[in-house]
Amino acid sequence: MNIAIDFDNSYANLPERFFSFLKPTPVQAPQLLAFNDALAGELGLGPRPDDAALAQLFSGNRLPDGAQPLAQAYAGHQFGGFSAQLGDGRAILLGEVIDRAGQRRDIQLKGAGPTPYSRNGDGRAWIGPVLREYLLSESMHALGIPTTRALAAVATGEEIARETWLPGAVLTRVAASHIRVGTFQYFYARNDLAALQTLFDHVVARHYPAARSPEALLDAVIARQVELVAAWMSVGFIHGVMNTDNTSISGETIDYGPCAFMDNYHPETFYSSIDRGGRYAYQNQPGIIGWNLAQLASCLVPLMPDKDLAVERFTAMINAVPDRVHAVWLTRFRAKIGLAKAHDEDAALITDLLALMAESGADFTNTFRALSQGDARDHFIDRDAFDAWAGRWQARLADEVDPQARMRAANPAFIPRNHRVEQMIEAAVDGDMAPFQRLLLVLSRPYEDQPEAADLTHPPLPSETVAATFCGT
Ligand code: AMP
Ligand code: MG
């Protein structure tokens, strides 16, 4: 039996220079590693066939009826340098479905074989980054933060060459769309105004039906990205590779390459092995998103009737991004310390706490969680300084109703800690999927105390600490 996917493709109807039609490259011996039944239900997919059939389907070996597989073209600034020609080098879009909530969603295979955009890459992925993305994206979703989702992970039965030979896998990613800032840049770099207009129309119809002008679209994308980055900051997430090709127009978190959730708090933290100098460090993310949105703004100028006026207005909008991030950040962090009302001194209260946490190397997640339980003091080296802060905080809390509940809803107990993710990958390579299953289950309820999973709240032992994360391509 095959699964029924009721495709309703729109990207495939755009002009041919937007993509290349091609089929996934078949794999030797596909085996299902994970399947997201809840998401399949959300997408309105038909009854679940057996694992073997799912593995055939989500490895790319068997194309579902109605699929129009294609690799999308895009460009992008990577670490500040522009590449006019990137594109899906190992991802193939099967098509789109309208989900149960009426939303259009892409279904894409990642690691499905080479494409015209592969450059020197092999078009494949190994199971480490595939399971990592599966777990982290599902965890992000459970945290309530917009993100691409994971529908399936399939081992290919083939070994691929990295630093060593590693087992290959394919991830099925679901996204509101895979249109990026870099998609606009692709056509802007080619001075292809007709394509820019077509892309604009497609994006407005698909994501921002209320946006009647490029200016309105820019404002709407800014709003979503500002929300997104502030949400990341609130859970200690470091994206790690905030290139413009990894900045989605829909405002979802996309590309779980070298990303990481911080253990001990320090604003300059970064993990990515390829991020020399920490361009994409934790505290730099608001500035970087402003920079990326400025690239989008440049691409939209040619679509405006009066270019000079457009530049003037877009510049003002981009200049306002830091303040907009700060405003959302403030709301998010107010909630983390139990505040719903706005007082002038709140920002200082929050930044003073963060400074104390940085000084103590306090665990980001556990310290905030402990605040809601009244036992945060032990996380600080300078107890007197914390007590002084806590005194100010208690006085401020007098003006709030039920701050405890607010804090529990804003401070997760469980995040996918890097060392646990690494341990999960090591086990999976040895054929043991139990740690993956356990993490997935616990992380699906991150705001609930789960005493039986207390070990998953522990920061890494020195011997477990993950110093760097890798793109793992
Ligand atoms: P990323 O750093 O994951 O955003 O990827 C940047 C570009 O490299 C994108 O165009 C990817 O499709 C491409 N890419 C990454 N890994 C591979 C691979 N193994 N084979 C082919 N292309 C790849
Ligand atoms: Mg990418």
Image (tube, rainbow, N blue to C red):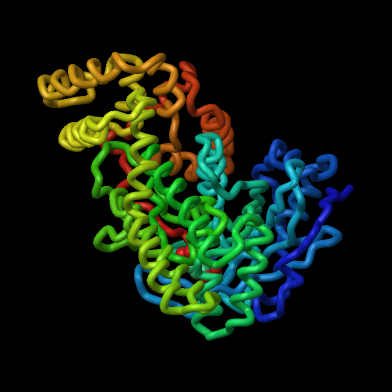
Residue 170 in view of the camera: no
For image coordinates 22% across by 19% down, the residue present is: 377
User: Which residue is situated farthest in the bottom direction here?
Assistant: 191
Q: Nearer the viewer, residue 82 or 67?
A: 82
Q: State the image quarter where residue 347 is shown.
A: top left
Q: Is residue 262 visible?
A: yes
Q: Nearer the viewer, residue 39 or 283?
A: 283
Q: Position of residue 227 (x, y in %)?
A: 45, 46
| Horizontal side of residue 311 vs 103, given as left or right | left
Q: Where 275 sits versus 89, above or below? A: above
Q: In the rendered view, does 270 fall on the left or right side of 63?
A: left
Q: Please identify the quarter of the rendering in which residue 355 is found.
A: top left
Point out residue 48 in the picture as x, y percentages from the top left corner.
81, 40
Of residues 468 and 241, the one drawn nearer to the viewer in this rendering: 241
Q: For this view, does 322 lie left or right of residue 55?
A: left
Where 73 falls versus 8 (above or below)? below
Figure disc tally: 0
Residue lying farthest to the right in this orientation: 1
Q: Residue at x 68, y 56 (%)?
A: 106
Query: At 37% from the left edge and 60% from the top edge, which residue is drawn?
Result: 290
Residue 262, given in percent of the width and then of the height, sits at: 34, 41
Residue 446: where, in percent of width, then height?
Answer: 49, 28
Decide: is 374 above or below 7: above
Q: Residue at x 86, y 50 (%)?
A: 2
